[in-house]
Image: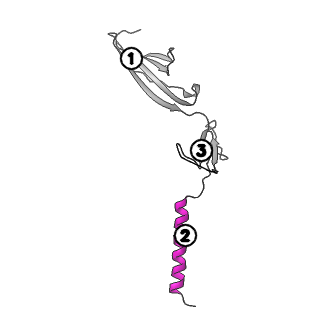
Amino acid sequence: MNEDKSQVTLFIDEDPKPIATLQVPVQFELDTRKLTDGEHTLKIVSKSPGGREGIRKIPFVVRNGPAISIEGIGENEVVDGVLPLMINAYDKGNQKSFIIVGSETPQSIPSWLWILLIVFGGWAVYYLITNFNL
């Protein structure tokens, strides 16, 4: 090992076993497919040739599993009664072919669009009544 270069040791979460020990500068590919979905922390411990250490922690979120989309309730929302929910889960697949079925999340028509249609309809009726005589 070359003693005039710094080295970094990479850890995931609180695992005492490092995933890699490398000399810098280096490019490293972190394979998140081996991690569970959810919050994780990448801890990088650097050690200089003089023996001094530095630590940096980087929190990140892994989402390799199917993405879940839900309409009808939001996070930390206060609700009551019966809630109509629209739920969809879709995966990236093998990323070599695109599958159309289930890849898009259907959504209901937004309320602002209904209001716009009602206002336009009201204006159209007003225009017809005031400008056309039978």
Q: Which corner quadrant holds the N terminus?
A: top left
Q: Nearer the viewer, residue 57 or 78?
A: 78
Q: Residues within 10 Å of mark 2 (few under 14, many from 20)?
A: few
Q: Amino acid at mark 3?
A: Ser
Q: Mark 1 to mark 3: distance in Å?
A: 40 Å
Disc 3 is placed on an element classified as strand
Q: Mark 3 to mark 2: distance in Å?
A: 29 Å
Foreground mark, 1 or 3, reads: 3
| Residue identified by numbered label 3 | 69
Q: Picture quarter containing residue 34?
A: top right
Q: Residue furthest right?
A: 101
Q: Which mark is residue 118?
A: 2
At x 52% / y 61%, what residue is drawn? Answer: 112
Disc 2 is placed on an element classified as helix
| Residue identified by numbered label 1 | 46
In the picture provided, is 103 more to the left or to the right than 45?
Answer: right
Foreground mark, 3 or 2, reads: 2
Q: How is the image coloured?
A: one colour
User: N-terminal of the two: label 3 or label 2?
Assistant: 3
Bounds of the magenta span?
109-132
User: N-terminal of the two: label 1 or label 2?
Assistant: 1
Foreground mark, 1 or 2, reads: 2
